[in-house]
Amino acid sequence: MPALSVAEYEALARERMEPGAFDYFAGGSGDELTLADNLDAFRRVRLKPRALRGVVEADTAVTLFGHRLALPMLLAPTAFNRLAHPDGEVAAARAAAAEGTVLCCSTMATCAIEDVAAVPGVSLWFQVYVFRDREVTADLVARAQAAGVRAVVLTVDTGRLGRRERDLRNRFGLPEGLVAANLAPYAKLVAERTGRKLSLSEYAHTLLDASLTWAAVEWLAGVARVPVLVKGVLTADDARAALDHGVAGVIVSNHGGRQLDGAVASLDALPEIAAAVRDRVPVLVDGGIRRGVDILKALALGAHATLAGRAYLWGLAADGERGVRDVIALLRAELELAMALSGCADVASINRSLIV
């Protein structure tokens, strides 16, 4: 029998993964307060279901940037998927294609964007950073666009990496044979420029630029030919700044509790950001999605869609592509039931009146 919940998939993943790799995915920064709060925020929200609405079967489909998804949940950008399963991001892409949703592929993927994009029927977004070397970012975006991605997601909360004590304790590093495949072509370029050969992991960390301002967002929006979203926004002011600098969407995120410990839970930050954006661009949220009812709560609080990272990684570790498909299908079925029990026939009928 397949696992009955994301929590059960997490337990399977813990059994099947090397402990250091599991902790890399599961852990957060500092005391992991924000990591826990992302989950607790959903538990604190209570619903007011509507009775006698005649909903026999709810429609979970949603449209983003002209593309119809089977459910308002995308697979979030997560690094190094081959730590969970040898097929890595390619397996996740196959699952996303089969289940009718989007994979947002990370720059730090262990499969190159070209290989992920080669999966038949996949709908891809691509997550990037504006690196110190703008040429690297521009080339990554060009490669992703040539491969057919539908949107670019700029992560803006990682100028420096959070202190992740599980990784320090485990002395975590990529095992032999796994690399950040998208960055491999650029390590040689850096060696030629600096006269020093860096390991790929060293290079990935030295790429990050802590001095960026909103001007970098405007630059990227000008470079890209597809919609650009910013990921890592937690305040209304930053959401308005993002709009002022040309973004096509905002992702409310605290990086899964992996950056600033003590930062507000993504769900708690969502309502003020949704109010500030006022439907001018889509607002998405990640961090803590473990149940279909979590998706319902996020939509009721103003999100147009959600993203889930750890949830699909646990499915990937448990059973590769099949496990990811099962997790997506499980969350969709839970969402459909929660919508029907709340009296919501479709996603458009979900609103703030559902929340206590």
Image (spheres, helix red, strand yellow):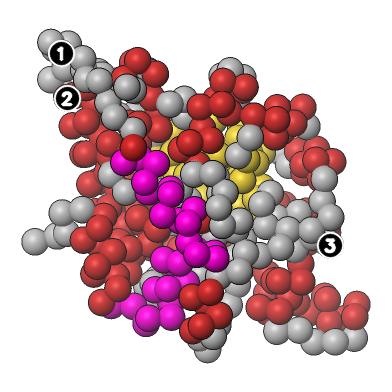
Q: Which mark is residue 330?
A: none
x and y percentages locating residue 136 in the rendered image:
78, 61
- Looking at the image, is mark 1 or mark 3 nearer the viewer? 1
Local crowd size for mark 1, using a 10 Å CA cut-off: few (<14), some (14–19), many (≥20): few
Q: Quadrant of residue 347?
A: top left
The residue that mark 1 highlights is 51
Position of 188 with respect to 120 (left or right) is: right
Kindly report the distance in space between the C-alpha atoms of the residues bearing marks 1 and 3: 56 Å
Local crowd size for mark 3, using a 10 Å CA cut-off: few (<14), some (14–19), many (≥20): few
Q: Secondary structure at mark 1?
A: loop
Disc 3 marks a residue whose amino acid type is Asp
Q: Which mark is residue 341?
A: 2
On the question of residue 122 being in view, the answer is no
Q: Secondary structure at mark 2?
A: helix
How many marks overall? Answer: 3
First in sequence, mark 3 or 2: give its number. 3
The residue that mark 3 highlights is 133
Magenta-highlighted residues: 16-43
